[in-house]
Image (cartoon, grey):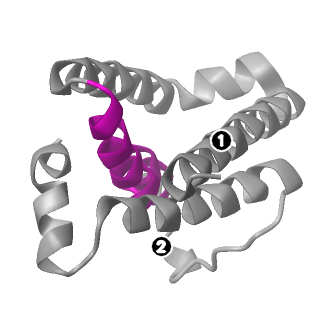
Amino acid sequence: ILFLFVGESLLKVIGLDVESFAIAGSFVIFFIAMEMVLGLTIFKEEAPETVSIVPLAFPLIAGAGTMTTLLSLKTEYHTQNILVGIILNILFVYFVLKNTNRLEKLFGKSGLNILRKAFGVILLAIAIKLFRNNTGL
C-alpha cells in the first residue's frame, strides 16, 4: 500500500518514469505467466533448500508485478478504488494461503495444474495489456 502513495516519487528519485517501470514490470509478469502456462522454470531460485511459504506468498503480495500494477492502476482509477481492490486481494490471498491443503484435496493435482494454466493465460493477457498501454501499441 505504501508503494501506491510513494512509488511514483521513488521512481523519480532514481530517474525512472512510470511508463518505463510498467513496461519492465510487464516483462516480469509475462515471464511468470509463461512459467505457469508452460511449466518452465525461467527464474532461478536463489536458495532452494530454504523453500517455505515465503516464496509462494511474497510475489502474490509484494512482488514486482504488484508494484507495477499499483502504479498502472493509479493512472486509471481513483485511489479509494485501488485501496478497496487491495483489501479484497489481501483477503483472497489470505484465504488461499490459509486453505492451501484443502484446495489441493478439493481440486487434486490435475485440477490445480489446470487452474495454474488458466490463471497463467489471464496473467499473460494482463502483461500484454500493461505493455500495450505503456508503449502506445
Numbered range of the magenta stretch: 54-77
Residue 15, quarter of picture: bottom left
For the residue pair 47 and 23, the one nearer the viewer reads as 23
User: Quick one: label 1, few (<14), some, or many (20+) residues within 10 Å?
Assistant: many
Mark 2 to mark 1 CA distance (whole Å): 27 Å
Tell me which amino acid carries mark 1. Leu
Task: Check if residue 92 falls in the magenta segment.
Answer: no
Give the x, y percent position of residue 70: 32, 43
- Residue ID at (34%, 21%): 91
Q: Which mark is residue 50?
A: 2
Please tell me which residue is depicted at 61% across the width and 21% down the height of the picture: 102
Which label was assigned to residue 74? none
- Image coordinates of residue 50 in percent, x first then y, are 47, 73
47 vs 61: above or below: below
Q: Secondary structure at mark 2?
A: helix
Apparent side of residue 124 relative to residue 136 in the rendered image (left or right): right
Judging depth in this view, the residue of 111 and 18 nearest the camera is: 18
Of residue 118 and residue 23, the one placed in the foreground of this image is 23
Q: Are marks 2 and 1 in contact (CB under 8 Å)?
A: no
Q: Quadrant of the N terminus?
A: top left
Where 131 sits versus 40, above or below? above
Identity of the amino acid at label 2? Answer: Thr
Q: Main secondary structure of the magenta part?
A: helix
Instruction: Categorize mark 2 by other alpha carbons within 10 Å: few (<14), some (14-19), many (20+).
Output: few
Name the residue beneath numbered marker 1: 123
Q: Residue 101: x and y, percent?
A: 60, 29
Residue at left 11%, top 76%?
Answer: 13
* 2 or 1: tag closer to the N-terminus: 2
81 left or right, relative to 134: left
From the top left corner, tell me how far across and down residue 45 is, in percent.
Answer: 58, 77
Residue 55, magenta (yes or no): yes
Asked whether, in this view, residue 108 is left or right of residue 64, the answer is: right
